Image (cartoon, rainbow, N blue to C red):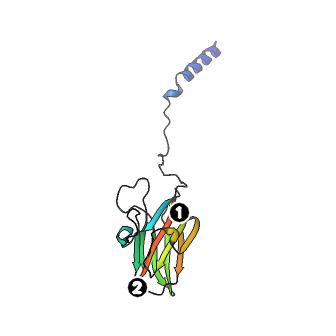
């Protein structure tokens, strides 16, 4: 009889706590990050002269830089216009440094955290560019999700006209 009472009591206690009433609390806040993708974005270094102002394109956004002095270092934001673009210059995904070292013009690309470069292209010449299209530039590097890249170019006459382009992907 005592055994019967004990079993009845335990079964009643177990049945009074249905699973629907149990509130499971999360120990961490959900993290909302954009996942890495294979989607590629065209980026250009911000500059002094837009493609429109230079007469290179009426629809393609981007800029030309003019490097004037051997002892100067310039830093320009590397920008994309992604699917969330509304207005302005674009989303900053890195920077490009321009400087002159040992008789060479150097362009150094750096991607910000969360982005990587799949390709870089550089136009650097004393002659004004005839096209904004990276396929027509003289310098090209194919990369695999790189965050840093560098070009060194012999250019002896100033000013040096520069268009810096990179194909960008998200890494996080």
Quick one: which residue is furthest to the top in this view? 1
Per the image, the residue denoted by label 2 is 69
Under circle 1, the secondary element is: strand
Q: In which quarter of the image is residue 160?
A: bottom left
- Camera-side residue of 87 and 29: 87
Residue found 54% across the figure and 71% down from its top: 149
Number of numbered discs visible in the structure rendering? 2
Under circle 2, the secondary element is: loop
Location of residue 19 with respect to 32 vertically, above or below:
above
Location of residue 8 with respect to 113 vertically, above or below:
above
Residue found 55% across the figure and 21% down from its top: 15
Q: Can residue 147 be seen in this view?
A: no
Of pointers 1 and 2, the one earlier in the residue sequence: 2
- Camera-side residue of 126 and 97: 126
Q: Where is residue 70 in the image (x, y as percent from the top left)?
A: 43, 86
Q: Where is residue 172 in the image (x, y as percent from the top left)?
A: 52, 56
Question: Circle 2: is it few (<14), some (14-19), or many (20+) Cα within 10 Å?
Answer: few
Per the image, the residue denoted by label 1 is 116
Q: Quadrant of residue 53?
A: bottom left
**Location of the N terminus (image quadrant):** top right
Q: Position of residue 123 (x, y in %)?
A: 48, 75
Question: Circle 1: is it few (<14), some (14-19), or many (20+) Cα within 10 Å?
Answer: many
Q: Measure how far apart labels 1 and 2 are at the Cα level.
A: 30 Å
Residue 19: mark in rendering: none
- Frontmost of labels 1 and 2 is 2
């Amino acid at each position: 009889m005592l055994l019967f009472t004990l079993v009845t009591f335990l079964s009643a206690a177990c049945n009074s706590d249905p699973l629907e009433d149990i509130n499971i609390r999360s120990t961490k806040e959900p993290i909302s990050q954009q996942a890495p993708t294979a989607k590629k974005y065209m980026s250009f270094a911000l500059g002094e002269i837009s493609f429109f102002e230079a007469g290179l394109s009426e629809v393609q956004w981007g800029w030309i830089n003019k490097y004037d002095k051997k002892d100067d270092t310039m830093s320009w934001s590397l920008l994309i216009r992604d699917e969330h673009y509304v207005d302005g210059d674009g989303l900053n995904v890195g920077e490009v440094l321009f400087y002159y070292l040992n008789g060479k013009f150097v362009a150094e690309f750096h991607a910000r955290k969360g982005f990587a470069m799949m390709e870089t292209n550089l136009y650097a010449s004393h002659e004004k560019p005839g096209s904004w299209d990276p396929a027509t530039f003289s310098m090209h590097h194919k990369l695999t999700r790189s965050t840093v890249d560098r070009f060194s170019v012999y250019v002896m006459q100033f000013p040096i006209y520069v268009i810096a382009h990179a194909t960008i992907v998200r890494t996080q």
